[in-house]
Each structure stands twice: as C-alpha cells, then as structure tokens.
Image (cartoon, rainbow, N blue to C red):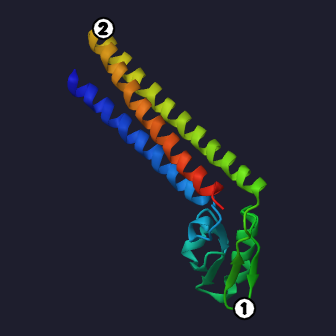
Amino acid sequence: MTEELNMIYDDFKVSNSKTLSHLESELTKIRAGKASPAMLGGVMVDYYGSMTPLQQVANVNTSDARTILVQPWEKAMLNEIARGIINSNLGLNPQNNGEQLIITVPPLTEERRRELVKRAKGEAENAKVGVRNNRKDAIDMIKDLKNDGLSEDMAKSAEEEVQKITNGAIKKIDELVEIKEKDIMTV
C-alpha cells in the first residue's frame, strides 16, 4: 500500500508543480513597467487563415526599457500582427514603419499598477483553486485505497501528508505573487 501512497504523493506534487509553472508564466505576462517580449506571449495572429502564436511569425525584441520591436518574417504580415496585438487587449498600440512594428510601452500610472496587482492576485487565486482541486483528487484516491484495505491510521497520515504538500504549494504561490506585487508597485 505504501507504493500506491507514494505514487499518489508524486502525482500530486507533479500536478502542483504544473499549476505553479502555469502561474509563473501568467505572471510574466503581467507587465511591471519595463518592456518585455514575454508581454506579447499570448498574442495570436491570423496567419493565412489559422490562428498562430506571434512568436511563430515574427521576432520579438526590446530595444530599450520602453520599446518592443516586432520584426515579421514576411512583410505582408505587418497589418495582421498589429491587429493581433490590438485585439489581445494588452493596452498596446503598435506603430507600423513598413519594416517592423514599434510598440512604445507607456509608463504605468498608480491606478494601472493597482489593477495589475489585482490581476496578479486573481491569477494566484486561480492557482490556489488548482492546488485545492489537486488535493481533492489525491484525497479521493486515498479514500479509494481505504476501501481497498488501507488501514484507518495510514489513510489519516496520508491525508495529513497531502495537506502538508498543499500548504507548501500555497505558500509558494503567495511568495510568487508577493514578488510580482513588489515588482509592479516599484516605480
């Protein structure tokens, strides 16, 4: 029975690490004042009829702390890429110079910083819900093992172990959001 419990713990830890890495990727998309190619990570472009990630149709670079340059591999895609950036609701307005798109990232106002912190906390709450769902799945598996002959004491200690792993994951989520909040609120 301990092998099955160890498998449950391992699956639970893997699920939580996936949740944490998803949170990290979502937090990188929330801008903190500086221009970053990751800000355009979720932008999809209509590439000859199919929606394609921006990184697959153009190079995305930063020239300085306030400017993102998007160099398409095909000049014909400039307008489609600009439309994709505008439709992504990032609040960015690309300028087309015929060769590339130049995106000037405006400085964040205090109000906008607070909105971004709220968004980061919302992403953290989604991650916590994911961890809690993972915990529920793990506890359900332990209950199934209990029905298959796992002793009451072992089931109880297994549930405590799952809760300990959950608390660690939630603490890590809180730390990630705290770091992001400091990053956003720093002028």
Residue that numbered label 2 is attached to: 152
Against 115, is 103 above or below?
below
Which residue is painted at 69% across and 86% down in the image?
76
Where in the figure is residue 73, as x and y percent of width and height? 58, 85
Where in the figure is residue 132, as x and y percent of width and height? 50, 30
Whichever of labels 2 and 1 marks the residue nearer the N terminus, that label is 1
Distance from label 2 to label 1 (Cα)? 71 Å
Asked if residue 111 lies left or right of residue 180, the reply is: right
Near-viewer residue (62 or 181): 181
Which residue is painted at 71% across and 55% down in the image?
113
In which quarter of the view is residue 155 placed? top left
- Name the kind of residue labelled 1 in the image: Gly
Near-viewer residue (88 or 121): 121
Near-viewer residue (135 or 47): 135
Against 58, is 19 above or below?
above
Against 80, is 91 above or below?
above
In which quarter of the view is residue 34 placed? bottom right
Which residue is painted at 57% across and 42% down in the image?
124
Disc number for residue 69 = none
Q: Mark 2: give few (<14), some (14-19) or many (20+) Cα within 10 Å.
A: few
Disc number for residue 98 = 1
Q: How many marks?
A: 2
- Name the kind of residue labelled 2 in the image: Glu
- The reply to whether discs 2 and 1 touch (Cβ–Cβ < 8 Å) is no
Where in the figure is residue 131, as x and y percent of width and height? 48, 34
Which residue is painted at 52% across and 36% down in the image?
130
Of helix, strand and loop, which one carries label 1? loop
Where in the figure is residue 45, as x and y percent of width and height? 66, 70
Of helix, strand and loop, which one carries label 2? helix
Q: Mark 1: give few (<14), some (14-19) or many (20+) Cα within 10 Å.
A: few
